[in-house]
Image: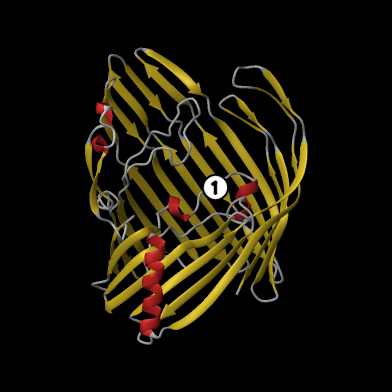
């Protein structure tokens, strides 16, 4: 319903403005004509010996993930004065999904320094400046620009942008709004008189969490120096999906956080961006005591240096600290494993094509559980490493191809053996 209302409003806006409409699109996929997953001897979760035989296969995926080929159609509309417009992006992903992707947006700029946006959209004006190397999917998984500084992502949102002076940008976003929200209540006691434990009246307002989802960001750019950025991202805290026995996965602890970053522009041909994230602790009380959950602190650095035909790009992402603590009849404290993720992808442009070397390294430390005076190492970490080489070129105007070889070396992480994987990927992307 939310999308239908926004789509109707956007169509009405485009018609009323007699807008100038532009259409663009893209198709991207990864063809994997050959992949070899090596045999490995290991142990299962009950310490029983197991063996995985070697496997060979092929596949078809998407450049940003193994989810099938992707087709995008991007429609933009703007009035003649450039003060109002709309954007719609449709996406077909694999054989399972067709629908609106990241944009179902309408905007209005009544003043040079003021803009209002509504709907579903991304705003990358402050986002991190260094992304990932496409080959990371087949070497060691990396992080994208959001690890340095998160983009502004509205999903049913309303945002106000202010540029009161040159170089200063301030945005405020209310997210996850329902345009048809109404106040109401559930009266289960009217329907279940024989179950008093289910009898209650609960007031409900569907936009009641909008202030908890508040996203405020600001940047200040000094010409010839760089861009300073800071933001607060509000979310509804969530830690229930975390399982200490399975280990911490990205996003398992969702907490409000502060972020800060600086992108240097003072050195010619060098892009350098460094950012950090400070998640706030989550506290709650239950029958067992007081619980505190802390997501890891993060620091990320990305850099790219262009020297005529040679380009050196890389990034370092870290996750440090964090864990949970339960204080009650007894105290238990769990510390997450520190993580360092390093990627380097130098390239040389030969004119007709570009040669790229790719390498990824991930270092994982120990996970520990403290119960009373007993310290238990629940995971001893490990090292992942992968490397590849590829050639990239653009042919027939807008058609980008990249093909090469990649190998992810065998590893042992927290006592579990991971298999070595050799892949021949072919990246295909066409934009129009």
Spot occupied by residue 189 in the image (x, y as percentages of width and height): 24, 35
Q: Quadrant of the C terminus?
A: bottom right
Spot occupied by residue 27 in the image (x, y as percentages of width and height): 62, 66
- Residue drawn where x is 38% and y is 18% of the image: 370
Instruction: Please tell me how crowded label 1 is: few (under 14), some (14-19), or many (20+) other residues with Cα within 10 Å.
Output: many
Spot occupied by residue 409 in the image (x, y as percentages of width and height): 68, 38
Q: Which residue is mark 1?
A: 142
Element type at mark 1: loop
- Residue drawn where x is 30% and y is 36% of the image: 281
Q: Nearer the viewer, residue 114 or 286?
A: 286
- Residue drawn where x is 74% and y is 35% of the image: 38
Spot occupied by residue 111 in the image (x, y as percentages of width and height): 25, 79
Whether residue 125 can be seen here: no
Q: Looking at the image, which residue sits at the far top?
A: 373
Res 83 → quadrant: bottom left
Res 78 → quadrant: bottom left
Q: Is residue 381 shown left or right of residue 267?
A: right
Q: Is residue 57 shown left or right of residue 295?
A: right
Q: From this view, report whether residue 387 is shown above or below residue 431.
A: above
Q: Nearer the viewer, residue 158 or 169?
A: 158
Q: Nearer the viewer, residue 264 or 54?
A: 54
Q: From this view, report whether residue 420 is shown above or below residue 163.
A: above
Q: Quadrant of the N terminus?
A: bottom left
Res 178 → quadrant: bottom left
């Amino acid at each position: 319903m939310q999308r239908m209302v926004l789509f109707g409003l956007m169509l009405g806006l485009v018609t009323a403005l007699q807008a100038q409409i532009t259409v663009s699109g893209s198709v991207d996929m990864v063809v994997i004509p050959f992949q070899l997953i090596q045999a490995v001897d290991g142990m299962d979760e009950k310490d029983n010996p197991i063996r995985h035989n070697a496997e060979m296969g092929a596949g078809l995926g998407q450049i940003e993930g193994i989810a099938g080929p992707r087709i995008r159609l991007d429609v933009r509309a703007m009035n003649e004065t450039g003060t109002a417009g709309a954007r719609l992006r449709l996406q077909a992903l694999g054989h399972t999904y067709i629908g609106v992707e990241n944009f179902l947006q309408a905007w209005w700029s009544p003043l040079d320094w003021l803009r209002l946006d509504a709907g579903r959209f991304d705003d990358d004006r402050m986002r991190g400046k260094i992304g990932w190397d496409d080959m990371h999917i087949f070497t060691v998984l990396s992080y994208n620009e959001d690890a340095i500084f998160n983009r502004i992502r509205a999903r049913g949102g309303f945002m106000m942008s202010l540029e009161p002076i040159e170089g200063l940008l301030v945005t405020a976003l209310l997210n996850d709004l329902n345009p048809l929200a109404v106040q109401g209540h559930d009266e289960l006691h009217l329907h279940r008189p024989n179950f008093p434990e289910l009898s209650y009246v609960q007031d409900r307002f569907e936009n009641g969490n909008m202030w908890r989802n508040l996203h405020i960001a600001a940047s200040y750019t000094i010409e010839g120096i760089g861009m300073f950025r800071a933001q607060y991202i509000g979310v509804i805290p969530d830690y229930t999906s975390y399982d200490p026995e399975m280990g911490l996965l990205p996003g398992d602890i969702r907490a409000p956080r502060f972020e800060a970053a600086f992108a240097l522009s003072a050195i010619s041909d060098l892009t350098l961006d460094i950012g950090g994230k400070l998640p706030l602790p989550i506290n709650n009380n239950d029958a067992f005591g007081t619980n505190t959950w802390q997501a890891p602190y993060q620091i990320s650095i990305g850099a790219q240096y262009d020297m005529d035909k040679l380009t050196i790009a890389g990034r370092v992402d870290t996750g440090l600290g964090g864990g949970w603590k339960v204080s009650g009849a007894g105290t238990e404290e769990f510390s997450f494993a520190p993580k360092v993720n390093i990627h380097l992808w130098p390239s040389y442009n030969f004119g007709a094509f570009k040669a790229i070397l790719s390498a990824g390294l991930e270092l994982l430390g120990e996970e520990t559980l403290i119960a009373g005076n007993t310290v238990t190492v629940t995971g001893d970490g490990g090292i992942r490493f992968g490397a590849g080489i590829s050639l990239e070129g653009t042919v027939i105007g807008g058609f980008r191809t990249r093909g090469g070889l990649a190998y992810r070396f065998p590893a042992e992480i927290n006592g579990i053996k991971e298999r070595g994987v050799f892949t021949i990927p072919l990246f295909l992307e066409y934009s129009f």
